[in-house]
Image (cartoon, rainbow, N blue to C red):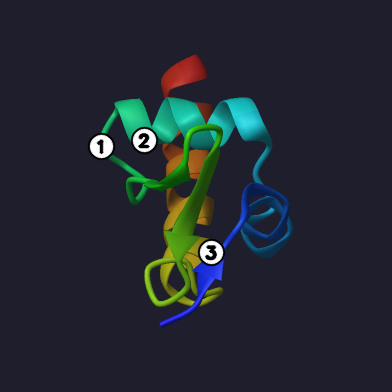
Amino acid sequence: MRIMRLKEVMKTTGLGRSTIYKYISEGQFPEQISLGARAVGWVDSEIDERGVGDRTEDIISLEKQKAY
């Protein structure tokens, strides 16, 4: 198990910081884990390019449909 920090999660998923936290609050993105008082990370197996990346495209597609 490897821990990914926010910058790496952003690069892997193509999502911005605010969007990641929005999706977490909506239950559409894996929860972060606390690494200390001011540090969080994500388990790499939960944020792989195939898993979250594919869901990210689905979520963006759904949001575009809601806008119309």
Identified at 56% across, 74% down, the residue is 49
Residue identifier under label 3: 53
Find residue 50 and report its horizontal and vertical position in percent.
49, 77
Q: Nearer the viewer, mark 3 or mark 1?
A: 1
Q: Amino acid at mark 2?
A: Ile
Identified at 29% across, 28% down, the residue is 26
The answer to whether residue 1 is left or right of residue 14 is left
Q: Is residue 18 above or below residue 9?
A: above
- Secondary structure under the numbered disc 1 in the rendered image: loop
Estimate the spatial distance between the alpha carbons at disc 2 and disc 3, rounded to whole Å.
15 Å
Q: Which mark is residue 51?
A: none
Q: Nearer the N terminus, badge 3 or badge 1?
A: 1
- Viewport quadrant of the N terminus: bottom left
Find residue 65 and report its horizontal and vertical position in percent.
46, 29
Q: Is residue 57 visible?
A: yes
- Secondary structure under the numbered disc 3 in the rendered image: helix
Q: Is residue 53 above or below residue 68?
A: below
Counting the numbered discs, the total is 3
What is the residue that sits farthest to the left in this orientation? Answer: 27
Q: Amino acid at mark 1?
A: Gly
What crowding class fits label 3: few (fewer than 14 Cα within 10 Å), some (14-19), or many (20 or more)?
Answer: some
Q: Is residue 32 above or below residue 19?
A: below
What crowding class fits label 2: few (fewer than 14 Cα within 10 Å), some (14-19), or many (20 or more)?
Answer: some
Q: Which mark is residue 27?
A: 1
Q: Amino acid at mark 3?
A: Gly
Observer-nearest residue: 16 or 7? 7
